[in-house]
Image (cartoon, coloured by chain):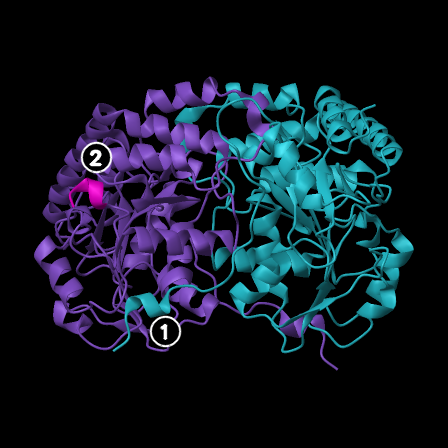
Chain colours: A cyan, B purple
Amino acid sequence: MSSWRDNLIKTEPYVAGEQPKGGKFIKLNANENPYPPSPMVEKAIAGFRAAGLNKYPDANVAPLCEALAKRAGVDTDNVFAGNGSDEVLALAFRAFFNSELPVLFADVTYSFYPVWCENMGIRYECIPLDDAFNYKAEDYARPNGGVVICNPNAPTTIGRDLDFIRSVLDANRDSVVIVDEAYVDFGGVSSLPLLSEYDNLLVVQTFSKSRSMAGMRIGCAFGSKELIAALRAAKDSYNSYPLDSVAIAAGIASVSDESYFADTVGKITATRDRLTGALRDMGAELPDSSTNFVFARFPGHSAVDIYNALKTKGIYVRYFNKPRIDDRLRITIGTDEETDMLIENLRRILGNNC
Amino acid sequence: MSSWRDNLIKTEPYVAGEQPKGGKFIKLNANENPYPPSPMVEKAIAGFRAAGLNKYPDANVAPLCEALAKRAGVDTDNVFAGNGSDEVLALAFRAFFNSELPVLFADVTYSFYPVWCENMGIRYECIPLDDAFNYKAEDYARPNGGVVICNPNAPTTIGRDLDFIRSVLDANRDSVVIVDEAYVDFGGVSSLPLLSEYDNLLVVQTFSKSRSMAGMRIGCAFGSKELIAALRAAKDSYNSYPLDSVAIAAGIASVSDESYFADTVGKITATRDRLTGALRDMGAELPDSSTNFVFARFPGHSAVDIYNALKTKGIYVRYFNKPRIDDRLRITIGTDEETDMLIENLRRILGNNC
């Protein structure tokens, strides 16, 4: 006789960065933005008419999609919005990857991709990046059920140009190609201009990083009307109303404030470049980052030891106990003050503080 | 050669009530609450510290689960919260229904259940309610991969007592039994007291109806620690952070205001009972409702004709073009004023206005 316990889910979940509670600490382990969202967001929330919450929100998040469409120069029917880019990506996997052929993505990339495949019974193949963590376009020129490229890639921080994306698209006229641009605003090159040429391209972005709104859960996707219609069908087969009315209002407010957005991104990239220099001065090896984090190895030192030593100082960074990357740390760009604290502690830990 | 178009999702989506836009209308088609949420909710949103939105919310929605646990007299580990009860139910299907045997639910019940099964490749069997739309416990005493009971049931409005739920649970020691209590606060009997006896029972509730928060997207579930852990694993295999920080604060505020909750529910049930009497006076046939809507047939009249006639008057009710229920209308309980307008128009349409 089987028990209900035998039939519980067995998928190995995605593991997010620790969320330390209480006390003073510096949290550089979840690629969060150290700055608050635009003051327009604060205003939108403070002025939100709560009385209207008795009604369901717009199921297709039309008001926010309109604002995003206008900014991207596309139609509203080319835009989808959901509960964080994780939900948008999950729905995209469900909407597009229904072939018997494996979906292709890198071995070192966002580790939620294989989790979604396992969750939904989608075949997949992880294709090794080269030794310098670069994608090779020719690796994606084989029969497949879909392609997912993270650009700039996480956790490697490396961005690729449109020639690369175009090569992947040209080799994949018969598959949907998802370009996950969670970090694109920090120095990557967006594939949005390719939308008019490729109706099998979906570009996914998030409000969690460059817009300082991880706590508001907003993700979005841009694609052909056919792809967006399929995404909406996937949503309506799972959860019809993914974004609440406050999030919609807050999202619109964020999109309206272009100058705050540019300022914040500028501050973070400046701090990142300073941190990159300081790390290299300490002997660390890391690629130039196109994201709001760095991915560094410390020759002669153990990454997990540094991770633990920083933790005792109240500084949380991300260590992955995984092949190929267990000699590295992923460190989010914090404020200048947080970054100074990080540099100071790292120097001490590495014994370079003389 | 296959095209990417061949591999797009083919699930037939759930269809929600129309969302008419602009102009003046009376919306009685989505079982929304006609009253605003508690003033405490308004206060929580107006006072929300938007600067903190740069950080991810608590992935397990712990602060809200604590408030819900306290109210229900259970531990926080017995509570799950998600993006509306639709998401909670979808995750529960994914977390619990992984057997080869069919999941059982009624033929006339919430029409999202078969959609989730199709979406996730779960076998299912729809079991006919009896001619008066009653569940029969013996129908659920057969080998199965899970059971879903909607209590009170939608769209039938009929609630069942704990003896019935207990019979279903006693016949299903080896399956997870989900009791969907979306409407329970309007006069149903909650299965929460049975949680201490049955570790295979999951009770799902929502903030969208009795708490007037459809626009805030909050659903929750109560169950054994094992079931809640499996639900969290399903969440972490799909979308780690389902509730945004504003929704969490607003949800806690709603739960804190017990008297507003009781007042609102009291007003709606009083209006419902008045509407029920008025409908019966017009010759309509409908069961006593334990929900915030009624489900009526109008002997000698066509339901779809009445639906269309009401629509021309700006009154939206719900008509289902489905076997067994296409002679009925589902009408949400509005304010007293809205209900008066509905009654007046219905009398006119039915020719009883002399």
For the residue pair B78 and B44, the one nearer the viewer reads as B78
Give the letter of the chain under mark 1: B
In the rendered image, residue A344, in percent from the top left (x then y), is placed at 75, 24
Circle 2 sits on which residue? B268
Give the quadrant of the C terminus of chain B.
top left
For discs 1 and 2, the disc positioned in front in the rendered view: 1
Q: Quadrant of residue B326?
A: bottom left
Q: Dominant secondary structure of the magenta stretch?
A: helix
Kind of residue indicated by mark 1: Ser
Looking at the picture, how far across and down is residue B38, in whole percent?
32, 24
Question: Which residue shows up at 81% across the image and 50% down it?
Answer: A191
Q: Residue at x 63, y 59 (%)?
A: A113
Question: Which residue corresponds to the image point at 53% horizontal and 23% vertical from the top-left?
Answer: A45
The total of numbered circles placed on residues is 2
Q: Is residue A229 left or right of residue B275?
A: right
- The magenta stretch is B184-188
Chain letter for the residue marked with disc 2 in the picture = B
Determine whether, in the image, residue A120 is placed left or right of residue A153: left
- As measured in the structure, the alpha-carbon distance from the residue carrying label 1 to the one carrying label 2 is 41 Å
Labels 1 and 2: the sequence-earlier one: 1
Is disc 1 in the same subunit as disc 2?
yes
Identify which amino acid the numbered label 2 is placed on: Ile
